Image (tube, helix red, strand yellow):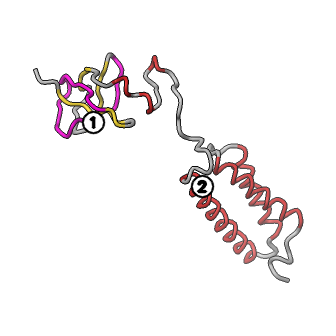
Amino acid sequence: MGLIDGMSVLGVILMVAGFILVGIEMVLPGFSIPGISGIVCLIISIFINAGTIQEGIILTLIVIALLGLMLGIILWLLSKGKIAKPIILTEEQNKEKGYISSNDLKYLLNKKGVAYTDLRPSGVGDFDGINFDVISNGSYISKGTPIIIYEVSGSKLIVKEIKK
């Protein structure tokens, strides 16, 4: 009797349900109920469908290969924009505390502040009591030196030293 012949209906249903649940977890990550339930379903289906240890090993390898293929397809779809990206922050959270999305940093252009850490060339700048990750224009800037944001490129704040 071959591997496919020995599979029960319950085992096949559990395997399909497991793949669907793990697929949901891959699209909406967080290792929550769908992921755990899917893994449990896949493990139980392997135990139900495998008649011998060798069949169990073969089924486990097949499941792992199919999960890898699913992950590759989902990552490809995410990279092409065919599936919405649930992880990327696109809205402002709390502007008063400094938590803002990266698409709203243009208002910081020409803002003066102080180097909170040494900039070699990246570091932290303090602007009106709010710390931002900044990058110098390629030069070393010591901690405590007055700086100004002269360029905003996406989420990068590029600063230079204010000469006295």
Q: Secondary structure at mark 1?
A: strand
Q: Quadrant of the N terminus?
A: bottom right
Instruction: Of the two numbered discs 1 and 2 on the same chain, state the one appearing first in sequence.
Output: 2
Instruction: Classify 35 as above or below 118.
Output: below
Where's residue 139, x and y in %? 17, 38
- Tell me the quarter of the picture where residue 164 sits: top left
User: Residue 44 at what x, y percent from top left?
Assistant: 79, 60
Front label number (1 vs 2) = 2
Residue that lies at the very extreme toward the right in this rendered image? 9
- The x, y position of residue 161, in whole percent, is 17, 28
Q: Which residues are magenta?
A: 129-151
Q: Is residue 71 above or below residue 29?
A: below
**Residue in view at x 75 percent, y 50 percent:** 37
Q: Is residue 144 magenta?
A: yes
**Residue found farthest to the bottom:** 1
Q: Label 1, on which residue?
A: 135
